[in-house]
Amino acid sequence: MADQERQSVFARLVMVLVAALVVCNLARGQDVKTDYMPGTDFSKYHTYKWVTISGGQHPNQIVDEQIKQAVDAQLAKKDLTKTTEDTADLLVGYQVAVDQEKQWNTYGTGGGWGWGGGMATATSSTINVGTLVLDMYDPSNKKLVWTGRATKTIEASKNPEKNTERLDKAMEKLLKDFPPKQK
C-alpha cells in the first residue's frame, strides 16, 4: 500500500472514531436521579409553593426565573397548581451546584500504527458541569417527600435560547415519573 493510501485510510478511521465519540457524548446528555419517601400518598398534593432552601446555592435572577418556569410547566402537566399561600400542600425548593471536571482534547497527525512519522497532542481543560437539585417537602410533617437531581443542566452558553431549551428538557426528564407510582 502506498503512503498516501495508508494516510487516507488512517484519516477515515480517525474521522469515524471522532464521529462515534461525538454521538456517544450527545447520547449521554443529562443524567437524572430521583428518590421519594416510601408510603407517601402523592395523590393528596394539589398545590405547591416555592421556598428558598437556606444554605443552598442559587443562580442569578434570570436563571432563577428560568428554572422556576421550567419546573412550573412540568408540575402544571401533573395537575399541580402553584400558589403563594401558606396552605400549599407541597413546598418546592431547589439549589444548584457547578462542579468542575477535566476534559481531555486529543488529536493526531500523520502516520500511525508503525506507518512512518506522526505526531499526537493532548491538552486538558476544565469544564463546568451544572447540577440542579429539586426538593419537595410536606409542610404538615415538615419532611422531604421527593428529591431529584439533574446533572449537566446549568451550563453557561452564549445562546440564552439554548440554555432555556436545555433546562426545559432536563426538568421534563427529571419530573417524568412524578408523582412516583407506588406498589
Image (cartoon, helix red, strand yellow):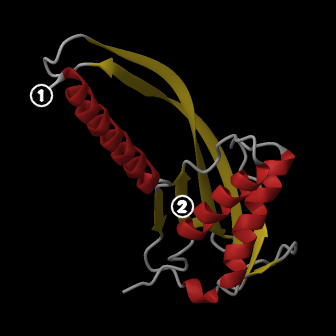
Question: Relative to residue 86, is residue 102 drawn left or right?
Answer: left
Question: Relative to residue 23, is residue 179 drawn left or right?
Answer: right
Secondary structure beneath label 1: loop
Residue drawn at (42%, 53%), measured in percent from left and top? 28
- Residue 99 in which image quadrant: top right
In three-dimensional space, the C-alpha distance between marks 2 and 1, rounded to whole angstroms, equals 56 Å
Secondary structure beneath label 2: strand
Q: Which of 117/91 is in front?
A: 117
Q: Percent x, y for residue 8?
A: 28, 32
Using the image, tell me which numbered label, if any, was put on residue 148: 2
- Amino acid type indicated by mark 2: Gly
Residue drawn at (46%, 55%), measured in percent from left and top? 31
- Amino acid type indicated by mark 1: Met
The relative height of residue 11 versus residue 132 in the rendered view (above or below) is above
The relative height of residue 155 versus residue 3 in the rendered view (above or below) is below
Q: Residues within 10 Å of mark 1 (few under 14, many from 20)?
A: few
Using the image, tell me which numbered label, if any, was put on residue 118: none
Nearer mark to the viewer, of 2 and 1: 1
Which residue is identified by label 1?
A: 1
Q: Quadrant of the C terminus?
A: bottom left
Q: Percent x, y for residue 34?
A: 47, 64
